[in-house]
Amino acid sequence: MHHPSVTIHDKQFSLYIPERKILHSVEIVATRLSHDYRGKRPLFLSVLNGAFMFASDLMKEMSTPCEISFIRLASYSDMHSTGKVKEIMGLNEDIRGRHIIIIEDIVDTGHTIAGLLPQLRQKGPASVEVATLLIKPESLQHNLAIKYPAMSIANDFVVGYGLDYNGLGRNLRDIYKVI
Ligand SMILES: O=P(O)(O)OC[C@H]1O[C@H](OP(=O)(O)OP(=O)(O)O)[C@H](O)[C@@H]1O
Ligand SMILES: Nc1nc2[nH]cnc2c(=O)[nH]1
């Protein structure tokens, strides 16, 4: 179902990006990836939870052989550093020499990707790039080269198509922004 607005918990959200526009942008990214990784048998690493829906639709549009695995990032406070560290959980594959494409639902401040990239590079992959459904250029606080963004958005909080507000809203087919 497509609604002009939805209420989740205490907040109201209005329709922002309709499903057909999302799927069209996913198709364009998949076409670029299929071209760039032909013959390289890339390994997609999808970051749970938010990226599951994007990962699914992106994989279906890939026209070159590729693999996918799912990782989680667990936050813990490192006593020896100031900020929070997000450790990779569930990476069972040996990624040495592999072409890695991280699948994210959103790059907002960039903290998550900035923390993840060095941890992956330490494991000796042939290459690491990022495919993200959404990016908020005005919110980005790191100098990150995100090679495969599907859509750029303004600095609004969004839900739907995998993205949640306190656990709810991931099932929505369209993307909504907070009013
Ligand atoms: O660029 P940043 O400011 O770091 O924000 C982006 C991150 O925030 C969201 O994850 P979240 O921690 O909400 O977990 P979820 O995917 O399980 O919803 C999203 O999936 C990204 O991983
Ligand atoms: N649901 C959701 N999660 C986020 N994580 C970082 N930015 C966002 C956002 O705009 N919406």
Image: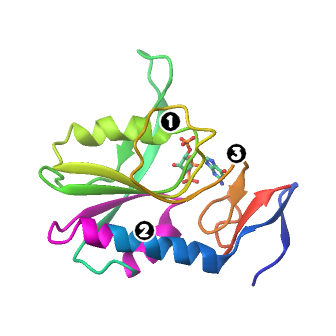
Residue at disc 1, secondary structure: helix
Contact between marks 1 and 2 (CB within 8 A): the answer is no
Residue 73 is covered by the magenta coloring: no
Q: Residue at x 69, y 60 (%)?
A: 159
Left or right position of 122 against 49: left
What is the CA distance from the residue labelled 1 to the residue labelled 2? 23 Å
Percent coordinates x, y for residue 71 in the rendering: 38, 55
Residue 42 is covered by the magenta coloring: yes
Left or right position of 117 against 56: left
- Mark 3 = which residue? 155
Observer-nearest of 81 and 130:
130
Going by the numbered disc 1, the residue's amino acid type is His
Q: Nearer the viewer, mark 3 or mark 1?
A: 3
Going by the numbered disc 2, the residue's amino acid type is Val
User: Which residue appears farthest toward the left when viewing the image?
Assistant: 97
- Mark 1 = which residue? 111
Sort mark 3 into few (<14), some (14-19) or many (20+) by Cα contacts within 10 Å.
some
**In which quadrant will I find the N terminus?**
bottom right
First to last magenta residue range: 33-60
- In the image, is residue 59 above or below residue 111? below
Mark 1 or mark 2: which comes first in sequence? 2
